[in-house]
Image (tube, rainbow, N blue to C red):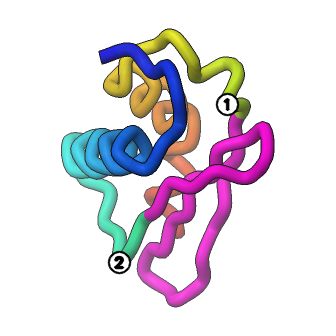
Amino acid sequence: MNITSFDQPTLNLIHKAFEIVLKENHIPYKKIGVVEDGDQLLFLYEGKTEKVHVFKWSKAQSQGVSIGVLAQSVLAPIIPTLRTL
């Protein structure tokens, strides 16, 4: 499924895809979230501590790609950082 809009069902699917990528990479977390903020999407990550970390990326660059590809492309560069949080 390619992303055409960022309604709540699509954000829920993106959230699920992020969960799968984190589990595949053995990244523990307490809570995660994916939300819209203007022209950006935010990945909210709570790891071992109770601190929430925010990672941003462009909604425009996310349209037209599959949800799985989006999850991989957003998370792959930050996996080393997530392992330390």
Q: Residues within 10 Å of mark 1 (few under 14, many from 20)?
A: some
| Foreground of the two, 81 or 56 | 56
| Foreground of the two, 30 or 67 | 67
State left or right for residue 39 relative to residue 73: right
Q: Position of residue 59 (x, y in %)?
A: 67, 30
Rendered residue at 21%/50% (across/down): 23
Rendered residue at 20%/41% (across/down): 24
Label ID, residue 30: 2
Instruction: Determine which quarter of the picture holds residue 53.
Output: bottom right
* Residue range highlighted in magenta: 33-57
> Where's the N terminus, which quadrant?
top left
Q: Which residue is mark 1?
A: 59
Residue 18 visible within the image:
no
Local secondary structure at mark 1: loop
Instruction: Determine which quarter of the picture holds residue 2.
Output: top left
| Foreground of the two, 8 or 43 | 8
State left or right for residue 7 relative to residue 13: right
Label 1, label 2: how many angstroms apart (C-alpha)? 25 Å
Rendered residue at 50%/54% (across/down): 34
| 52 over 33 or under it: above or below | below
| Foreground of the two, 33 or 25 | 33
Residue 73 visible within the image:
yes
Query: Most prominent secondary structure in the magenta stretch?
Result: strand
Q: Circles 1 and 2: CB distance less than 8 Å?
A: no
